[in-house]
Image (spheres, helix red, strand yellow):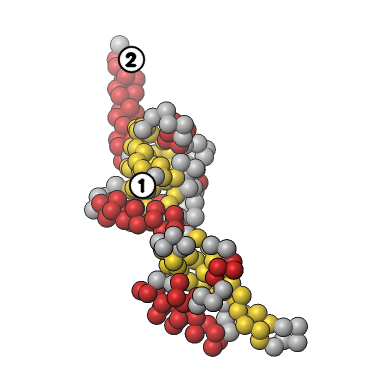
Amino acid sequence: KRNEDYLGVKWLDLIHPEDRKFYLELRNQAFNSKKSFSIQYRIRHASGKYRWIEGIYSPSFEVDGSYGGYIGIGIDITDRKSLEEGLIRYKMLAEKVRDTILFVEISGQIIDANNAAVELYGYKRKDLLKLTVFDLIEGGRSVAIEEMKNGEKDGVFFETIHKHQDGTQFPVEVSAKTTTILDKRVIICIVRDISERKNSENALIDSEDRLDALRLELC
C-alpha cells in the first residue's frame, strides 16, 4: 500500500492477533524504561496475508534532552522465517543421528547444524551459525560448493581436512547433497571424523614398511 492508505489505521490492528499481547507487553516494558528493543511479529500485508517483521525501536530525545517518543524500522524477514521452519523437519532427523550434519547455503553460509556439529567443531551454536563452511576447511576450499554451485552435481562424496575452533586439524569424510527448501537450494553436509581410521591406516602402512625393511635385511 501507499503511505497515505495507512492513515487512520491503528498499527495494532495490523499485527497478527496471536502476536499482539507479546508485542504490547514488550513495547510497554521498553517504553516505561525508555530502552531500545527488537521484536519479531507478523503483520498483515495489503494482500491480506501476514508477513514476518523484525521491528527495531529506539527512544528519541530532543536537543534539550526531553523524551520525544520512539522511532523504529521494520525489516521483512518472512523468507528467513520460512527457511527456518522448513529446516525444522530436517533438523529433527539430524538430531537422531551421531554424524555431524551442516545445513549450508550455496554461498557457503552455515544456516543450521545439529548438536553433533557443535560438539565436533567446539563452537557455541550461535558462533557456529555466523561462519561459512569455508571457515571450517583447511585452505578454505569447498569441493561441495564448487561442484554444486553451478548445478553440475546434486551430490558429492570426498575426504578433506577440517579445523576445530582451536585451529587443530582433523581428517573428515563428507557426503553432501543439495535439496530445495521453500524454493531455496540448500546443501546438506554429513561430516564424519575419520581420525581413528586414518591413524589405523597409517599404522598399517608403517608396519608394512618395517616388514619390507626386515625382508631386505634377511635377503
What whole-number distance in Å separates the C-alpha atoms at marks 2 and 1?
60 Å
Quarter of the image holding residue 155?
top left
> Which numbered disc covers residue 118?
none
Foreground pick, 16 / 135? 16
User: Which residue is at the far top?
Assistant: 219
Near mark 1 (Cα within 10 A), the count class, few <14, some 14-19 or many ≥20, is some
Instruction: Please tell me whether mark 2 or mark 1 is closer to you in this view.
Output: 1
Reply above or below: 122 against 143. below
Q: What residue type is labelled 2?
A: Leu
For label 2, the residue is 216
Quarter of the image holding residue 63?
bottom right
User: Which residue is at the far right?
Assistant: 63
What residue is rendered at 31% in x and 56% in y? 88
For label 1, the residue is 181
Q: Which amino acid does label 1 sit on?
A: Ile
- Judge from the rendering whether residue 79 lies leftward or rightward of residue 219; answer left or right: right
Q: What element carries label 1?
A: strand
Image quadrant for the C terminus?
top left
Foreground pick, 97 / 178? 178
Q: Position of residue 137 (x, y in %)?
A: 47, 41
What residue is rendered at 49% in x and 42% in y? 107
Q: Position of residue 159 (x, y in %)?
A: 38, 34
Q: Is mark 2 on a helix, strand or loop?
A: helix
Q: Where is residue 124 in the image (x, y as percent from the top left)?
A: 43, 60
Near mark 2 (Cα within 10 A), the count class, few <14, some 14-19 or many ≥20, is few
Q: What is the number of callouts on the image?
A: 2
Reply above or below: 216 against 117. above
Foreground pick, 16 / 63? 16
Q: Where is residue 20 in the image (x, y as percent from the top left)?
A: 41, 77
